[in-house]
Amino acid sequence: MSTSSATVGVVGLGAMGRPMADRLLRARGELVIHARRPQPELLDAGAAWAETPRELASRVDVLLVMLPDLPPLEELLAGEDGLLAGDGDLLLLIGSTSSAPAVRELAARLDEQTSGRVRVVDCPVSGGVDGAEAGRLSIMLGGSPDDAAVAADVLSACGTPVLLGPLGAGEVAKACNQLVVSATILALGEATVLAERSGLDLEALWTLLGGGYAGSRLLESRKDKLVSGDDSPSGMARYMVKDLGFAADIAEATRTAPALLPALRAAFDEIVAAGLGDRDIAVTRRFIASRDTEAP
């Protein structure tokens, strides 16, 4: 497949998919989209609209899927108007954060059902909405070298795509990423509460610590939220429950006994149970502050 002449489509135009679609449209000059809701701004910018998943599949060579997980994709695949109803070749780029074994199973099933016509590369991303808007995403690829090369060329408009191994490798990498992100944001929230209750200037604290070993891209992007206590939604905390569950599956499959992962899963389960799951992951500050212990 010549990536320069390939027609690209996007489905899943949410918080991450929409800015990625914007960048793909600007880079390629054309894009085909399908969504549950109208997308007038993308259409005004030059994107083409497909009324059904079947029409979408018939008009594109490469389809980026930015849905939350595989079940919503399964809904789009099936039926007389589904993605599989066409008869052309299609490379699915699955950007959903999903189970690596489930992605492999889906790819094998699609290969059998379509006689190899539909192929899969997993390509979960990291970097948040700000990274998607700036084209600075880390894009974790898993798949055959040939298909991953096509995916990398297409997705280069959105960030840095890197092939990490065979199909499912991207999902394993994303699980590792979420393990680090969840641990970091929980530590940042906890440290913020400790510092605030000790009378420290939070702005000065995180500016100072950001220049040392405590510094990170996550601290850069969430510093203002941690300082102000603003946890309005951006990257919703409840998604961590699913993502850390996938990390636990990998730990079990690789016979790894994690020390930190169980505590992180318990903390984010508690965040969701407290009704805070739809807040930004910087809600860890509010969560820790709400867990007051009784005075001795």
Image (spheres, rainbow, N blue to C red):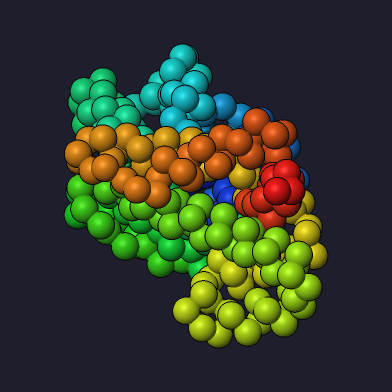
- In the picture shown, does residue 102 fall above or below 268? above
- Which of the two residues, 110 or 243, is positioned nearer the viewer here? 243
**Residue 77 image position (x, y, % from top left):** 43, 24
- Which of the two residues, 201 or 122, is positioned nearer the viewer here? 201
Query: How many labels, in total?
Result: 0
**Residue 94 image position (x, y, % from top left):** 40, 42
The residue at the point 47 percent across, 25 percent down is: 71
Q: Is residue 127 visible?
A: yes
The residue at the point 51 percent across, 75 percent down is: 214
Q: As drawn, is 24 to the left or to the right of 44? A: left
Q: As drawn, is 161 to the left or to the right of 19? A: left
The residue at the point 67 percent across, 64 percent down is: 194
Q: As drawn, is 71 to the left or to the right of 237? A: left
The residue at the point 48 percent across, 45 percent down is: 264
- Which of the two residues, 191 or 221, is positioned nearer the viewer here? 191
**Residue 215 image position (x, y, % from top left):** 53, 76
Q: Can residue 7 be seen in this view?
A: no
